[in-house]
Image: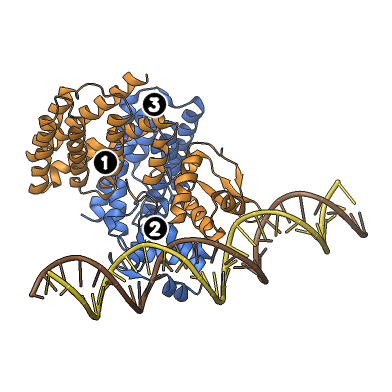
Chain colours: A blue, B orange, C brown, D yellow
Amino acid sequence: MSTPGRGLHGRVLDSLGPAITAGEYPPGSILRTDELAQHFEVSRSVMREAVRVLESMHLVESRRRVGVTVRPKSEWNVYDPQVIRWRLAGADRPHQLRSLTVLRSAIEPAAAGLAARHATAEQCAELTECALGMVAHSRGHRLAEYLFHDVAFHRVILTASGNEMFARLGDVVAEVLTGRTQHEVMFEDPDPAAVTLHVRVAEAVRARDAVRAEELTRQITVGALQELDILAP
Amino acid sequence: MSTPGRGLHGRVLDSLGPAITAGEYPPGSILRTDELAQHFEVSRSVMREAVRVLESMHLVESRRRVGVTVRPKSEWNVYDPQVIRWRLAGADRPHQLRSLTVLRSAIEPAAAGLAARHATAEQCAELTECALGMVAHSRGHRLAEYLFHDVAFHRVILTASGNEMFARLGDVVAEVLTGRTQHEVMFEDPDPAAVTLHVRVAEAVRARDAVRAEELTRQITVGALQELDILAP
DNA sequence: TGTGATGTATAAGTCTGACTTTTTGTTTCC
DNA sequence: GGAAACAAAAAGTCAGACTTATACATCACA
């Protein structure tokens, strides 16, 4: 997914990023560019580029005569899609998944309300199509196809809200939904109630009923939260 | 604010970042590292580091034999504090301010609800202190002091929610509130109703009344949205 | 003994030049 | 007209020399 191996510095990041976000180098740890460059068998310039990227994510801080120090978790740019992906791939995946689901439950109802006001006719059609796709694949262990339409549905909602900040959370939601299907338990077919809710949200948006779209979406996110509570109470 | 002039590459970013986010180089524009390096009078290595950072923000994409192309706005990492700052300093400041205020109105009520459940005794005390500070400076054009306590109040709420994603929006909210006071109109003393609402939110959190804290915070954010509508309908 | 000035080692920061690799666009040839 | 070979362009990589800021230790002086 995304951009794998865009140069040497990218491969260094794919290795160092997850290590830092996983807490392998605890906050306050001091790294030295030269040592890192040796360890990853790259030149200093490549290593410096990688460090610059980590610095822009507020994962590390580079200071003269000191080295590259790992910053406390509370300062990380946790909205950076790359950071999110690293953390979801690491040990605190459950914790991260919960944080993001709580975020979803705040954002998506509001987005749905706005979508009901601003969605274009085309977006309404897409929404209905996605919902129907979910229905069509909600039985018989067609999880991959179901997920595809589920992700598309939420992306359309977020985009149709007309708010760029909401729209950019599409990747995050996709990551959460995908993660839930792939790594977490999802033995059985999706909850029929959830499927129905999606269909009704699509209807509400098409009917320009902002209040109903918001409330129904809230029910979807509440369901997602409950699902987490069942898995890790 | 933040980290001004952390090296040569930082100064290049301070110049190039705002230019790109302001649309000075429209999406699809092609820049060349060597030319940029000449233009900014820095070495290629410094320029490359700057480009790497812009790349990690998804502002540009670097491809061999092509150059550094500016990505469409829809792909930018709009949650990156640096990007937010650049955009707030640029021409589409009003648009950005509106997006962020809508985001606030989705996040903060939810955060307040969680804060009512999870806030420590110390955080409750801080909250009350902030609210009282707002009251104390709500008259007589003491805008700077009022702002200080306002920002602190919202930071505590977001932190006390216990959700790291919410907590990291503290800087964004601070930026919005500061921007409102500094650049936008705020001739008169703050709205007394808003001040009262903050006091009542503090009370609700202390009383562990999540529903009330959420509802009162919603009223604060609704007020913020209305304020924007009055300024730019 | 404490405090301020001085010195020094260290690691990041910067620059330069040469070389490699990928990719695009053209040209050639069947 | 299409495929294959070619050439040029720009990013990517590397190595080495030099600069600069700064933490820390040392020493002098009060």
Q: Earlier in the sequence, mark 1 or mark 2?
A: 2
Residue at the location (48% across, 39% down)? B21
User: Dividing the picture into quarters, in which one does residue B161 lie?
Assistant: top left
Q: Amino acid at mark 1?
A: Val
The residue to which callout 2 is attached is A55
- What label sits on residue B99 in the rendered view? none
Specify whether disc 1 shares its chain with disc 2: yes
Q: Chain of mark 1?
A: A
Residue at the location (36% across, 45% down)? B81
Q: Amino acid at mark 2?
A: Glu
Residue at the location (53% across, 57% down)? B48
Q: Secondary structure at mark 2?
A: helix
Q: Secondary structure at mark 3?
A: helix
Q: Is residue C19 left or right of residue A107?
A: right
In the depicted structure, whether residue A203 falls above or below residue A21: above
User: Dividing the picture into quarters, in which one does residue C11 lie?
Assistant: bottom left
